Amino acid sequence: MTVGFLRDWLLDTLSRLGLIYRSTVGKQVFYRVNRNHPVFPELRVLVAKTVGAIQVLRSALAPLANRISLAFIYGSMARREEKAESDIDLMIVGKVTPEDVLARLGDVEPLLGRAVNPTVYSEAEFKTKLASGNHFLNSVLRGEKVFLIGEKDELGKVGGIRLAESRTDQSR
């Protein structure tokens, strides 16, 4: 069985069930979700809990993006070892308060079905803790990260350090 066959079979099945709409324009085929389908709310939650969690978090933090230098997921989700009961560990560095972040994440936890635990630092506090050899921060920075705002290069600039190579998967 090929990937193309499975994709076509799945799209055809979802279309026959009424979960998605299929339309064609010339030789192109387009699909869109049927938001009025009775199982759409559950399907939306399922997608958000799995492949959509990162995009949901990016969207939630977007209104604060001009005040956030860095935001990344670390821990089991970044390592792709999360379980159903795993929380999402989130590191945020910038000119935001924990209250700002929690206000943006309020609707996210029920949607994802997971607790989101943000750790929020100002840039100055982040640099100071790194310079003092803070075990927690050093451990987080050595681990895998999924960047939501900013990139690995900015992490080095904000922290005032040169980081060792580690996989940082932004495409998840």
Image (tube, helix red, strand yellow):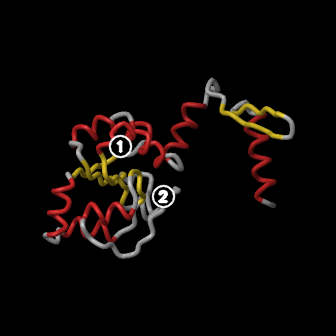
Does 11 sit above or below residue 126?
Answer: above
What residue is drawn where x is 36% and y is 36%?
A: 63
Nearer to us in this view, 6 or 69: 69
Which disc is residue 123 wearing?
A: none
Numbered disc total = 2
Residue 146 appears left or right of 66: right
Nearer to us in this view, 3 or 68: 68
Does 57 sit above or below residue 2?
Answer: above
Q: Position of residue 111 (x, y in %)?
A: 44, 37
What residue is drawn where x is 16% and y is 64%?
A: 129
Q: Position of residue 5 (x, y in %)?
A: 81, 54
Nearer to us in this view, 28 or 112: 28
Residue 108 appears left or right of 139: right
Query: Which sits earlier in the primary sequence, circle 1 or circle 2?
Result: 1
Mark 1 lies on residue: 65
Amino acid tagged 1: Ala
Q: Position of residue 14 (x, y in %)?
A: 73, 38
What residue is drawn where x is 16% and y is 56%?
A: 124
Quarter that holds the N terminus: bottom right
Secondary structure of the residue carrying tag 1 is helix
| CA distance for labels 1 and 2 | 16 Å
Amino acid tagged 2: Gln
In the picture as drawn, the residue positioned furthest to the right comes out as: 26
What residue is drawn where x is 19% and y is 62%?
A: 127
Nearer to us in this view, 138 or 109: 138
Quarter of the view holding residue 42: top right
Mark 2 lies on residue: 170
- Count neighbours of disc 1 (C-alpha within 10 A) and say few if under 14, some if 14 to 19, many if 20 or more: some
